[in-house]
Amino acid sequence: MQEETNIPFVFKAISLISLAILLVPVGVVVLAGLNAGDYLTFPPQGLSLRWIKAFLTSSMFLSAYGVSFVVALVSTLISTTIGTMAAIYLTRSRGPFVSFLRGFFMLPIVLPGVVLGLALYVFYVTSDLGLARTMTGLLIGHVIVTCPFVIATVTAALVGFDRSLEEAARSLGASPFTAFRLVTLKVISSAISAGAIFAFIVSFGQFEVTLFLSAPDLQTLPSAMYVSMRYKFEPTAAAAGIFAIALVVLSMVVTSRLVNLKRIFER
């Protein structure tokens, strides 16, 4: 009996420790970005908004922030659409070829980002498609990286889906598309939203693939932070990290609120 009563406490303790470990880097970045000193150090030499202002007045960082946001948003829309369709096909098809496709779609997660970025760069350069160092080429790389996260989340929701609900809608006169839109899509909407959040976060913070595919006039925020850290050991990069963290948190909160509002209106 004593062991059973201690299990919930152990789980809570492990969860709190895990959460603390995950939040420590975030706290370090925030405090480093608010450092009053001239160099990137921790613990900070006092607190100041000096480097926040430096970030807001830096054309390089603001441009990179905008590029990262646009790339993350567009790649999220594309990967969410493609990933959802791929997940539906993988869960509703049978055969050995489907297992091969499932493993193939998960390859970008398994492969190191450096290998994937180098492979795409070599393909762009050696082909006559004109994708090297372009926004289109960069978007293709980000879609390849983010699609597996959408496929994984939507597939998990479709595994236990009862297809008899669609058949019931079809028997009541609904077309295949209408049955899918009114039944299946509503059931998996939360999984699609979760996959989109994962895709946006991964795309916004993507560095390895971007390092090979970006151009000097097409820098994303992680690339700009890397360049800044190479030549200037200033807390401006940490201040940029604060705004990156804020955008990710804001996107998660907004998506969660939109999903909750949708459920309220559906009731």
Image (tube, helix red, strand yellow):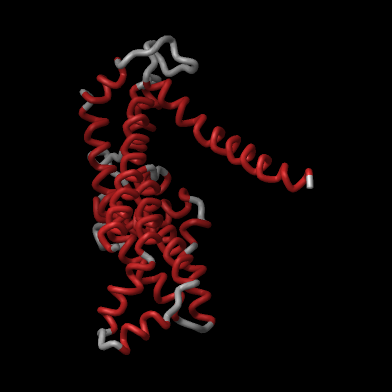
Rendered residue at 31%/86% (across/down): 170
Position in image of residue 166 (x %, y %): 36, 81
- Name above or below for residue 17 compared with residue 91: above
State whether residue 127 is above or below residue 243: below
Residue 152 vs 117, above or below: the answer is below
Figure quadrant of residue 54: top left
Q: Is residue 132 visible?
A: no
Is residue 4 or residue 150 the one in the foreground?
4
Using the image as rendered, state which of residue 102 and residue 267 is in the foreground: 267
Left or right of 208 on screen, residue 182: left
Asked which quadrant contains residue 48, the reply is top left
Counting from the top left corner in percent of width and height, residue 49 is at 30, 16
Q: Residue 90 at what x, y percent from top left?
A: 45, 75
Q: Relative to residue 221, is residue 193 depicted above or below?
A: below
The residue shown at (32%, 83%) is 169
Q: What residue is rendered at 58% in x and 36% in y? A: 16
Q: Quadrant of the C terminus?
A: bottom left
Q: Position of residue 219 (x, y in %)?
A: 28, 39
